[in-house]
Image (cartoon, rainbow, N blue to C red):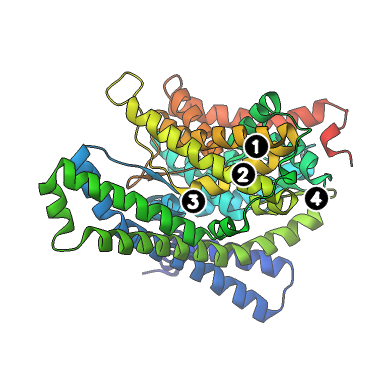
Amino acid sequence: MTIIQATFMFLQEVFARPAILVGIVALIGLLIQKKPFTDVLKGTIKTILGFVILSSGAGIVGLSLKIFNDLLIGSFNITGILPLNEVMMAVSTEKYGTQMAIILAIAMVLNILLARITKFKFIYLSGHEAMWISCLMAIVLNNLNLPAWQVIVGGSMLTGLYMTMGPLLTYKMVCNLTGTKDIALAHTGGLAYFISAKVAKYTGNKEKSAEDVNVPKHLNFLRDTSISITLAMFFLYLGVCILSMIVNPAVAAKALGANNFIIVSVMNSVQFAAGVYVIMAGVRMALGEIIPAFTGIANKLVPNAVPALDIPVLFPYAPNSVMVGFMAAIFGILAGFAMQILLIGTPLELPIVLPTVFGAFFIGATSGALSNKEGGIRGVVIGGFVSGILRIIFPALLIAFGKVTVSNTTFAGADASAIGIFFGSVSKIFSGQGVFILILVMFALPIAYSLLTTKKLESFEK
C-alpha cells in the first residue's frame, strides 16, 4: 500500500465518521482564533464526545418506542410518528451523517460570507437548529438521487442561505418584544411563530397584555423538559395500553408479556425522556465548543452582525405569555391530533403525528411571547392554540409531500417542513439537475439584491 493510498483510506474513514468530522471543524475554528493548546484539545474532544453521546441517546429512544409502536400498529393499524428533531437527526446519522457534517461545516462559512457581502447581517448561532436543517438537506437532496458532491454543495448553499435569511421572518416581532434590534431568532419553528403572531395580531387586542395576568407558580415545573416529556409520554403510553387491551387484547398481551401495563408505561416514558435528555446533552456538549469557535470568527469578519439566538432568549421578556401560550398550545396539539384521526379514510388523510407536551412547550411558549405584543392576552391564547395545530400539521405534511421520515420520526420545525414540502413538490416538476440549478439561483438572489439596491434595510437601522 502506497502512502497516497493509505492517506486516502484514512481521509475516507474520517469523512465516514461525523463525530470526528465535526470535531475537526471545532479544531480548525479554535486554531484560527489562536486559542491555547489545552482549550483546543478540550474543545475538539468534547465536540467528538458530544456526537457519540447523541448517537447513544438515539438508541435509548428507539428502544423505548418499540412497544408503543407495536401496540399502535397491531391494535389500531396506526403507525404513529413522533416529530423530534434530536431523535430524527440521531437516527439519520448512520446513513446521512457524513454529508450532514460536511454540509453544516460549509454552511457556517457561507453564513458568514453572505452576512459579510449582503445586506442581511444575521449570524446564526443556534448550531443545533442548523444541524437539523443540514440533516434535512442531506435527506431531501438524496431523495432526488443527486450525486454526493451535488448533495453537499447544494445542501451547504441551502443551509447557509437559511441561516442568513431565516431569522428575517420574525426579526421585526423579536424587535417589538425585546425593544432592541440587537438580537434575532434562530429556530426552525420560525414560520409557525410568524403565522401564530400574525393570527394574534388580527384576532387579539394588544392593549390587554398577558403580562398583567397572574399565572399560578405551581405550573412552572412543566418548564423542566425532562419532567414534561416523562409525564406526556406516560399518559400517552397508558392511554394506548388501555385502548389496546380493550380493542385487541391478544396484541396487548403479546406486546406487554407478563408485565403490568402501568409499570410498562412508567418505565418506557422515563426511558424515552432519558434518551432525549442524553441526546440533548450530547448536542449541548458538541455545540458548546463549536459555537464559540464559530462566533469568534464571525465577529472578526462581519461588522454590525446581528446574532440570531435560540428561543429561550425570548422567555424572560414575557414570562406570563410563555406559560399561557404553552397551555393554549397543548389544546391546539390535541385538536390537531383529533383532526388527523377524523380524516383517516378520507382523501385528506395525513400521517398520524403524535402529540407531545415537549413540543407544546417550545412552540407555545415562543408563540405566546411573540403574540402578546401583537394581540395581547387574547392573541396569546389564539396564537398559542394555532401554533399547537401547526406543530401537528406541518410534520404530517412534511411526511406526506416531502417524504422525509426515518424510523417513525421526522423533523418538528415548521421551517424544516416548509423546505421539505417545497423540494418534494418541485421534484415533481424538475429533474434532480433542474432542482440543483434552482438551488444555485436561490443562493444568488440575496447577493444580487444587495448589489443592485442602494437602500439600507430599515430592519437593521439601529
Query: What's the CA distance linking mark 1 and mark 3?
Result: 19 Å
Task: Judge from the rendering whether residue 256 lies leftward or rightward of residue 181; answer left or right.
Answer: left
> Mark 2 or mark 1: which comes first in sequence?
2
Q: Which amino acid type is shown beneath numbered disc 3?
A: Phe
CA gap, disc 2 to disc 4? 38 Å
| Secondary-structure class at tag 1 | helix
The residue positioned 63% from the left and 53% from the top of the image is 126
Instruction: Locate the N terminus and report the quarter of the image it occupies.
Output: bottom left
Q: Label 3, on which residue? A: 358
Looking at the rendered image, the disc whose residue lies closer to the viewer, 3 or 4, is 3
Nearest-to-viewer mark from 1 and 3? 1
Q: Residue at x 84, y 26 (%)?
A: 453
In what element is the residue under mark 2?
A: helix
Tag in front: 3 or 2: 2
Name the residue type under label 4.
Val
Q: Establish if 175 lies above or below 263.
A: above
Calculate the distance from the C-alpha at mark 3 to the C-alpha at mark 4: 36 Å
Secondary structure under tag 3 reads helix
- Dot 4 corresponds to which residue? 302
Q: Which residue is mark 1?
A: 380
* Spatial CA span between label 2 and label 1: 7 Å
Under mark 2, the amino acid is Val
Q: Front-most of 72 and 11? A: 72
Pick the residue in front: 148 or 92. 92
Amino acid type shown at disc 1:
Val
Q: Give how far apart the Cα atoms at labels 1 and 4 are.
A: 36 Å
Secondary structure at badge 4 equals loop
Check contact, mark 2 vs mark 1: CB within 8 A: yes
